[in-house]
Image (spheres, rainbow, N blue to C red):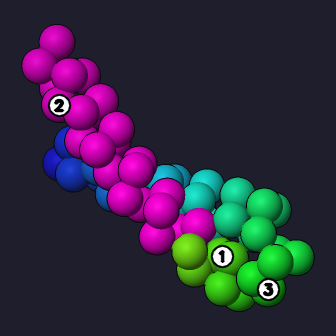
Amino acid sequence: MIIVLSLLLGFAAALGAGALSGVRIGKDALGAKLAAYMGGLYGIISGSAAVVLTVLVLALT
């Protein structure tokens, strides 16, 4: 149960952080909505590997 919860919270954090950084970086060039979508996509893509590996390592130790 705790592993599933940590995976879900990690994915949500990666998505949120990606969206916020996308808006901060690309708001002027792309518009806030598109920048948030693109940042969220890249955040979940890059963050998912880190979340899975971290939860796996912590579960095994």
Q: Which circle's residue, 1 or 2, is located before the other in the chain? A: 1
Q: Earlier in the sequence, mark 3 or mark 1?
A: 3
In the displayed structure image, the side of residue 18 where residue 8 appears, left or right: left
Residue holding disc 2: 56
Q: Residues within 10 Å of mark 3 (few under 14, many from 20)?
A: few
User: In which quadrant of the rendered view does residue 53 lie?
Assistant: top left
Q: Position of residue 44 (x, y in %)?
A: 41, 60
Of tags 3 and 1, the one toward the viewer is 3
Q: Looking at the image, which is closer to me, 59 or 2?
A: 59
SS at badge 2: helix
Category of crowding for the residue at label 2, using alpha-carbon neighbours closer than 10 angstroms: few (below 14), some (14–19), many (at least 20):
few
Q: Is residue 12 left or right of residue 55?
A: right
* Residue at mark 1: 36
Amino acid under label 2?
Leu
Q: Are marks 1 and 2 in contact (CB under 8 Å)?
A: no
Q: Is residue 51 part of the magenta span, yes or no?
A: yes
- Mainly helix, strand or loop, the magenta region? helix
- Disc 3 marks a residue whose amino acid type is Gly
Compared with residue 49, is residue 15 higher up or lower down, i.e. above or below? below
Q: Residues within 10 Å of mark 1 (few under 14, many from 20)?
A: many
Up-down: is 26 above or below 13? below
Tag nearer the camera, 3 or 2: 3
Q: Is disc 1 placed on a helix, strand or loop?
A: helix
